């Protein structure tokens, strides 16, 4: 039998949880800036490590006073803001589980998240408050922040408890043993099924992610990590925030990426690290680069990009998933990498690249990417209340099947090739084609649908739907396109809504009568010819 993370001899975080790390850092760096809030509109605010821990204790007590206990789940539906971090880590402080949901989600998606997670309550902001109340009718309570991520609050049709009501409670939290195997958080991530799956992390997962990410990024207490990627995703939560907390670095938090404010904020706080996605690099190319800045590196999907010389910053490539917690493949902060590669295998993981016949791929070959680690430590614990999906995610030898395909270069670097699963990457967000197809299929008169990716200059890819209508509806395709778009917007997050609808009499077929999506992609590629 393989060792379990419940065995203290096999767990580097035995006797720890998130509180352990934060209490230690508050003792070491009590007066050092931990969280610096830079809203797009409004005043900067700063919390030291000591003040952050005090605030988390307050929020934990406020949650406890409202009946939240260890193991209970709370929806945290917020844009980037200090309250997002207070809620996320405040839940963990008392052993509750934050379900951090995508702020672009539709009402139908939020209803699904609430039902699937069996959440008891929700924490949100004015812009989303009525949406959450409508989608999550079973919520025991909803608290709402004062502003919309630093901007004036949107109008609300109802009254809600303010987020500040979580502060200042006189409840004394009961003693609780630190258990690194307990659930820490849940993120819903798109897969090849029609519904997203809830990825469950333990406290050990979060601590592992912080420790390993900091090592891969070469972080130390002197670093300042600029964070604008959404805090409901793994990149911001682990690659940035937990990595910074692990070493005692400072975090500069912005509501979202702003190309015009990027350099002023980075210069003001002497930021040394940040995470990018490709469209952000493209946007920054339109702005002048300061003569002097403090960035040592920034992370991206590929190493040593051509734009690095323009910015005077080296890109460290990496690959990871919500299920892998941190980078399974990564470049080096100490040595030059192959330009355009994702880097090399991270020593904390096992990687296999296999051909279609199951044999290991050789140099210069492309194969399916598999990864192996320890569940609940270096890999996620499980898919929430879905043992069938959890089991199906691993092969008979314990390899997690990523759905990505990778080429091994002649000199040993790993280069992203494509996705074997039917997935799209839209502005850094994973989108399952099957999820979009399921929504479109439910629309009246849709006989058949196929969703494929179309290249996009800024977003990398956007979804495009090919639709076969039945009967008389086929004669009114133009009007139906508008109705289909409205239907998708009501059911899906905005980035999942197809950018185009193409109506066809027939869909191309493969020899097994499956829809030949490769042919549809070719059709899109030749549109501009």
Image: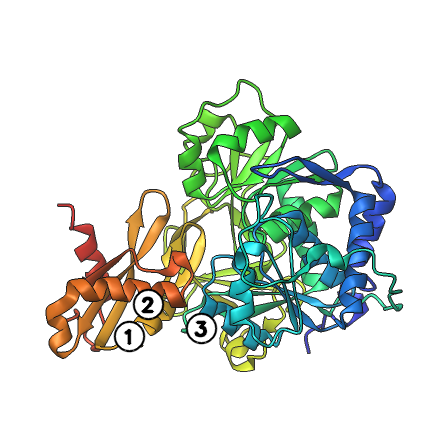
Give the left or right position of residue 460, taking residue 308 as reference. left
Reading the image, the residue beneath label 3 is: 195
> x and y percent of residue 221 in the render?
75, 37
Q: Residue 272: in sight, yes or no? A: yes
Q: Residue 396: in sight, yes or no? A: no
Rate crowding at label 1 as few (under 14), some (14 to 19) or many (20 or more) other CA atoms within 10 Å: some
- Name the residue rendered at 53%, 59% in the picture: 128
Q: Quadrant of residue 216?
A: top right
Residue nearer the viewer, 336 or 116: 116
Residue found at the far bottom of this picture: 388
Q: Is residue 125 above or below residue 457?
A: below
Under circle 3, the secondary element is: loop
Give the left or right position of residue 94, taking residue 150 as reference. right
Reading the image, the residue beneath label 2 is: 487
Q: Are marks 1 and 2 in contact (CB under 8 Å)?
A: yes
Disc number at residue 443? Answer: 1
Q: Quadrant of residue 465?
A: bottom left
> x and y percent of residue 384 in the render?
58, 75
| Disc 3 from disc 1: Cα separation | 17 Å
């Amino acid at each position: 039998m393989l060792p379990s993370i419940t065995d203290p001899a096999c767990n580097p975080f035995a006797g720890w949880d998130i509180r352990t790390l934060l209490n230690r850092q508050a003792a070491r760096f009590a007066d050092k800036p931990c969280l610096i809030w830079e809203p797009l509109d409004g005043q900067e605010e700063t919390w030291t490590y000591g003040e952050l821990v005090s605030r988390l204790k307050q929020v934990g007590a406020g949650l406890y006073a409202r009946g939240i206990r260890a193991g209970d789940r709370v929806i945290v539906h917020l844009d980037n803001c200090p309250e997002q971090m207070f809620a996320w880590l405040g839940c963990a402080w008392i052993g509750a589980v934050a379900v951090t949901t995508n702020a672009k989600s539709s009402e139908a998606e939020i209803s699904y998240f609430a039902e699937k997670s069996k959440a008891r309550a929700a924490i949100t902001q004015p812009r989303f408050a009525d949406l959450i109340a409508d989608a999550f009718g079973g919520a025991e309570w909803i608290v709402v922040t004062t502003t919309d991520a630093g901007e004036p609050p949107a109008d609300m049709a109802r009254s809600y408890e303010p987020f500040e009501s979580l502060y200042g409670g006189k409840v004394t939290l009961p003693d609780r043993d630190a258990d690194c195997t307990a659930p820490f958080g849940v993120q819903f991530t798109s897969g090849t099924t029609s519904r997203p799956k809830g990825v469950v992390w333990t406290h050990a997962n979060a601590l592992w992610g912080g420790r390993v990410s900091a090592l891969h990024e070469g972080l130390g207490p002197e670093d300042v990590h600029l964070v604008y990627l959404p805090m409901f995703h793994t990149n911001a939560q682990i690659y940035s925030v937990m990595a910074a907390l692990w070493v005692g670095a400072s975090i500069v938090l912005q509501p979202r990426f702003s190309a015009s404010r990027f350099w002023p904020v980075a210069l003001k706080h002497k930021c040394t690290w940040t995470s990018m996605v490709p469209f952000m690099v493209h946007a920054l190319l339109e702005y002048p680069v300061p003569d002097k800045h403090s960035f040592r590196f920034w992370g991206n999907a590929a190493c040593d990009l051509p734009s690095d010389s323009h910015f005077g910053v080296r890109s460290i490539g990496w690959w990871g998933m919500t299920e892998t917690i941190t980078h399974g493949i990564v470049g080096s902060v100490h040595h030059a990498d192959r330009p355009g590669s994702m880097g090399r295998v991270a020593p904390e993981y096992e990687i296999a690249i296999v051909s279609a016949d199951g044999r290991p791929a050789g140099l210069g070959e492309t194969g399916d990417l598999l990864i192996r680690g320890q569940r609940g430590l270096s890999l996620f614990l499980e898919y929430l209340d879905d043992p069938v999906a959890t089991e199906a995610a691993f092969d008979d030898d314990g390899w997690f099947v990523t759905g990505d395909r990778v080429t091994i270069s002649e000199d040993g670097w790993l280069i992203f090739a494509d996705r074997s699963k039917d997935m799209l990457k839209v502005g850094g967000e994973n989108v399952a084609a099957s999820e979009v197809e399921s929504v479109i299929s439910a629309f009246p008169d849709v006989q058949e649908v196929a969703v494929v990716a179309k290249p996009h200059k800024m977003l990398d890819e956007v979804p495009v739907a090919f639709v076969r209508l039945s009967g008389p509806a086929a004669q009114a395709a133009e009007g139906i396109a508008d109705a289909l778009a409205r239907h998708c917007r009501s059911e899906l997050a905005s980035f999942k809504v197809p950018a185009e609808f193409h109506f066809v009499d027939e869909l191309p077929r493969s020899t097994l009568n499956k829809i030949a999506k490769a042919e549809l992609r070719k059709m899109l590629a030749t549109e501009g010819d």
